Structures are given as structure tokens and as C-alpha cells.
Amino acid sequence: MEPLHDALRHHGDVEATAGLVDLAVNVYDEARPAWLDESLRGSLDDVGRYPDATGAQQALAIRHGRDPDEVLPTAGAAEAFGLLARLRPWRHPVVVHPQFTEPDVALTQAGHPPDHVLLRAEDGFALDPRHVPDDADLVVVGNPTNPTGVLHPAAAIRALARPGRLVVVDEAFIDFVPGEQESLAARDSEKAPPGLVIVRSLTKLWSIPGVRAGYVLAAPDVARDLRAGQAPWSVSTTASAAMQATATGQAREEQERRAARTTTARQVLVDGLTARGIETVPSRAPFVLARVGDGVHARLRATGWAVRRADTFPGLGPDWVRISVRAPAVTQRLLDALG
Ligand SMILES: Cc1ncc(COP(=O)(O)O)c(C=O)c1O
């Protein structure tokens, strides 16, 4: 096995150390809805039995207008990347970077180190499907992408489809985009080409990184083969409860409220950075990639602020940082510190 690169295993949580204001972890910053907490607590009544994710699978199928056999609940999106990496003996896997690095690590661990297609700052980190090699049998792309925040048009992602290729779209942050614009989660036989695999996460929007709840939407044969690679009972009773609780109409309303609040709060951050002459990448995610300059990350830490270093992402250097969108009052204090 290739040695793992420490840089690719670096995540925002290790930067948010005690005593620093956390703008490194992109977990939504308001309290969880009471109905979600009730459901999480209620799940404890059932933990004396082995978990069964069938109820979650059915609820998610209804939420996305898919058949239950197209839905695979997972222990977070992270489990899905491992399952996908081990799904086939990939000949030419490609990860579109800069993006979340766990798919890369999972592929390397599985013995299939991926090629990188690097999107460029000069192009606004836009996805050009022509840059992906024709013979790639697996392509992984984030939408919106962590850490750039760029939301790729669904058409650009559809254009990646090829016979015999799986296109994995990491939609872990798309629930922050109002109306889930550009999502390919809903099945639409005309628009969604075969081979699309959508990975979703409940972690960020619902502030439950400790629960480990995510899922995959894919063609029935792909979902079946992924399921075959899963450890038994990997989705806990509590994770299943979270999936069911957040698949309701009530949850959709709360999701849209959170997405709208994030959009407004992000503008405060972007306007403040721009006013200070700091370049930002237009973001549709709950974070902003900003070119603050080399050394600023460390200086912010020294003054009590944790922002996510970006030099561990392929294609980015030490002049970039990723800043989480927070309540405007918190953002204002960060802007003052930057000033
Ligand atoms: C883009 C992206 N995808 C997936 C994940 C993993 O999500 P989960 O907590 O569901 O494993 C993260 C976590 O940081 C992420 O940033």
C-alpha cells in the first residue's frame, strides 16, 4: 500500500483547538431543531437491538423520489468513499481537485491511487469536463466543492458521464444551497445519465458530526454492490433516526431557512473581505476560500482565530485559507482581527 500523505488526512477539526474561535469546521452554528434532538434521544430506547436501516432507506427514497433499492444509508459520507474505492478494481480513477481529500485517501488505501485534475484559480475553479481523461472509469467531484465553495452546473457534471464510468458527486454541502439547485440527487431518467453516484451527508447542515449519518443514491446494481462491501450494522440506530427525522417536510422547511440564513451571513463575510482587498472565490457553500496571503493563517491562530489552512488541498498553496460562515457578529470580529 502507498504510504498515506498526512496532508490529505488533515481536516478542519484538528485546527479548532480549545481557546480559538472555530471558523475551521463547517458545521452549522445554530442549535439543532428540538424535533431532531428528540429523535436522537428517542433512538436510545432502541439501541438494545441491532440496528436496521430499512426505515431510513425508505424515508430517504421518498425524500429524493427514488426507489428504495437506489438508496444506501452509510456511516457518514466518509464510509461511502471507502465503499466506492473498494467497489471495483479501478483502472483509472480521477479526483477533481481542489476538493475534500478523503476520496483520494480511500482510493489510495484501496490500492488505486487516483490521478488529479486540477481546477485553476484563474478559471474561478470552474469544472471543464473536457479536462477529465476519456479513459477515467471513476471520476469524483464535489458540488458545491469543499474548499472552493464553487457550485458546478448540473450540466457540467452530466457531461462527465461515459459508458462504463462512475461519476461520484459529493453533495455533502448541497443542502446549504437554496432549493438544492444543481443537485442531481432526484432521479430523472432523461437528465441523469447512468453511472451517477450521489453522496450526501447529514453532518454539516444538522450539526451532527458525532452521529455519522450519510447516504448514497445510485443505480440499483451499484447500490447493491456497495451494500455488499459494508460492514454489518455500520449505520447505527441513532444515525437511522436522524435520517428519518430529517427526511420530512418539516425538515425541508428548516433546511431552506438555514440555507437562506447562510446565504445572508456569507455575504457579510465576502463583503468584509472584499472591502479589505482580499480576493475570495464566489461561494455557494457555508465557507469561503480567501487569498489572505502567506503567514496570515498562523497570525490569526496567534490572535485566537482558527481558520482552515488550505495548503493541504491539492492545487492550493499557503496564501489561501477557508473561512466558515458564522453569525455576522462573529464574522465582524474576525474581519476586525484581519484588519
Ligand atoms: C465535502 C465533504 N464531503 C464529505 C465529508 C464527510 O462527511 P461525513 O461527516 O458525512 O462523513 C466532509 C467532511 O468534512 C466534506 O467536507
Image (spheres, helix red, strand yellow):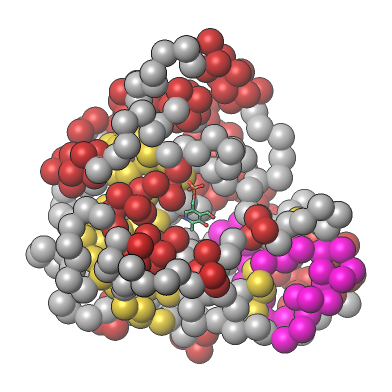
Quadrant into which the N terminus falls:
bottom left
Can residue 236 be seen in this snapshot? yes
Q: Quadrant of residue 283?
A: bottom right
The residues colored magenta run: 285-308
Residue at the extreme left: 163
Q: How many marks?
A: 0
Q: Is residue 307 magenta?
A: yes
Residue 227: percent from left, percent from top: 24, 39
Front-most of residues 125 and 301: 301
Per the image, is 227 magenta? Answer: no
Q: Is residue 75 left or right of residue 33?
A: left
Q: Nearer the viewer, residue 182 or 14?
A: 14
Residue appearing at x 35%, y 35% in the figure: 73
Q: Residue at x 31, y 72 (%)?
A: 113
Q: Is residue 152 above or below residue 55?
A: below
Residue under the point 45% across and 43% down: 76
Q: Is residue 31 above or below residue 52?
A: below
Q: Residue at the bottom extreme?
A: 122
Q: Position of residue 127 (x, y in %)?
A: 37, 75
Indicate the position of residue 67 as horizontal and vertical percent values.
Answer: 21, 33
Instruction: Please tell me whether residue 196 is drawn above or below residue 90 in the rendered image.
Output: above
Foreground of the two, 209 or 2: 2
Q: Position of residue 122 (x, y in %)?
A: 50, 89
Write the residue at 50% across / 53% down.
173
Can residue 183 be seen at all in this image of the molecule? Answer: no
